[in-house]
Amino acid sequence: MTRKITIRFTSFRECPNCDGRGDDGAEWRPVECRRCKGRGKLITGVEVEDSKDGILPEDRFEFTATGEVYLLDFDEDEEIEVVKPSDEGRESG
């Protein structure tokens, strides 16, 4: 049976680099903010639920402000299905 990992973003903050605009602020050449990748928000809280172990404690994973989650102490040979929120879900926080 495939193990299923569900990731939920639980808290956000406005990107300090672009002040929540999602771009560099130049009207004549709007470029996507490099820090928030154009979303205007950074992720500050993540919940990871494992179909085998339930909700994982924070010492079992690491995450970045852009939403990348790294699982710690998992067998690399084990088959895992990862369910991540959509980009729309990231904006709603």
Image (tube, helix red, strand yellow):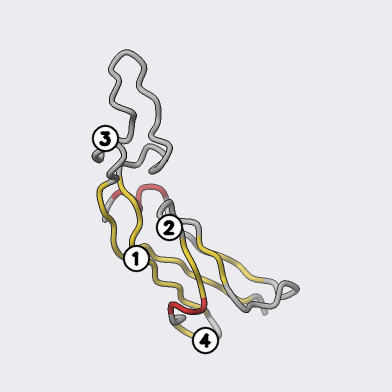
Question: Which residue is under mark 3?
Answer: 21
Q: Residue at x 44, y 55 (%)?
A: 67
x and y percent of residue 68 in the render? 50, 57
SS of the residue under disc 4: loop
Nearer the viewer's eye, disc 1 or disc 2? 1
User: Are the two marked residues, 4 and 1, in contact with CB atoms closer than 8 angstroms?
Assistant: no
Nearer the viewer's eye, disc 3 or disc 4? 3
SS of the residue under disc 1: strand
- The foreground one among 40 and 91 is 40
User: Are the two marked residues, 1 and 2, in contact with CB atoms closer than 8 angstroms?
Assistant: no
The amino acid at mark 1 is: Gly
| Quadrant in the rendering for residue 20 | top left
Question: For the view shown, which residue lies furthest in the top direction?
Answer: 28
User: Are the two marked residues, 3 and 4, in contact with CB atoms closer than 8 angstroms?
Assistant: no
Question: Which residue is under mark 1?
Answer: 45
Q: In this image, 31 relative to 73: left or right?
A: left
- Give the Cα separation between the discs numbered 1 and 3: 21 Å
Neighbour tally class for label 1: few under 14, some 14-19, many 20 plus, Cα within 10 Å: some
Question: Which residue is under mark 4?
Answer: 53
- Give the Cα separation between the discs numbered 3 and 4: 38 Å
Sequence-first tag of 3 and 4: 3
The amino acid at mark 4 is: Asp
Q: Is residue 32 above or below residue 46?
A: above
Sequence-first tag of 3 and 2: 3
- The foreground one among 48 and 79 is 48
Sequence-first tag of 4 and 1: 1
Q: Is residue 64 above or below residue 3?
A: above
Q: In this image, 33 relative to 72: left or right?
A: left
- Give the Cα separation between the discs numbered 2 and 4: 20 Å
The amino acid at mark 2 is: Pro
Nearer the viewer's eye, disc 3 or disc 2? 3
